[in-house]
Amino acid sequence: MPAVQTRDFGVMDLSPQAFLSFPNGIPGFDREHSFVLIELPAMAPAVVLQSTETAELSFLAIPVSVVDAGYQIGMTPEDLRALRLDETQQPSEGRQVRLLAIVSTAEGELLTVNLLAPIVVHLETRVAVQAVRSDAKYSHCHPLRMSAGDSSCS
Amino acid sequence: MLVIRRRAGESVLIGENIEVRVLELSSSYVKIGIDAPRDVAVLRREIQVTAAQNHSAAGLSASSLPSALRKLRLNAEKEEEKEKGEGK
């Protein structure tokens, strides 16, 4: 099993299924094309997205369905094409793709997730994109504590 | 902010090398074409917002999660219970 140097957990052996390829990188990190998905029971439902190229680059993510069970996928045709999915319809979560929201902190302790731009993983090919929506339906800093309305990030 | 009224097919020049043309109008969106030199980054604004958010997210380590996670688990359980309740 391929070993990966991680930022938070030392060197880890991971199954080939854990390896995700990002053909376009992700916004802000255009040259990062390869990440591993680390799923530890102690952290569930959160997961870690660790770059395989840059050991210091790692993200926390939460399945979008945990944050918003009614989330509606809204991928652009370009992103659908990048995953080789049908451009005329949105993929189905669980069957074709998995959606993860990257976690960050707003002011102070409040954790937020980016629902504007979920990481979309193709379940079969393990190709992934950060699919930035072009509508304003969801926030890039949706508060994790479900007390809606106290979003205070810029 | 400078506001200019344009019709489909008309364009606006920015500096000497950038042209923004309105290609198509519909009730819910406009299609615009942008001609700009290669060294000028042209991005949807949301992508820049996400890039900034990613840079801030990259600073968050797994150890900062536990307390937030407990709350999240509780919330997830509550949701499940609610769904079960609704199913009855």
Image (cartoon, grey):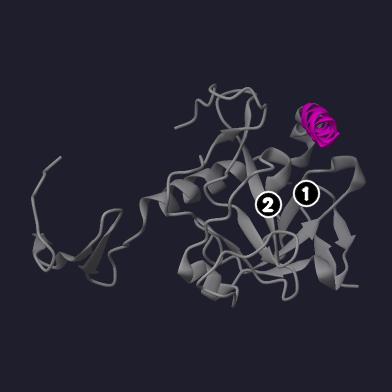
Where is residue B69 drawn, in percent x and y? 79, 32
**Amino acid type of the residue tagged 1 in the rendering:** Val
In magenta, the rendered stretch is B71-88
Could you tell me if the residues under marks 1 and 2 are in contact, i.e. CB atoms within 8 Å?
yes
Mark 1 / mark 2, whichever is N-terminal = 1
Q: CA distance from mark 1 to mark 2?
A: 9 Å
* Camera-side residue of A52 and A70: A70
The chain to which mark 2 is attached is A
Q: Residue shown at 62%/69% (left/top)?
A: A22
Where is residue A123 drawn, in percent x and y? 74, 68
Residue hosting label 1:
A47
Q: Residue shown at 8%/51% (left/top)?
A: B5
Quick check: is B79 in the magenta stretch? yes
Label 2, secondary structure: give it: strand
Residue hosting label 2:
A100
* Camera-side residue of A109 and B32: B32
Q: Bin the neighbour count of mark 1 within 10 Å (Cα to Cα): few under 14, some 14-19, many 20 and up.
A: many
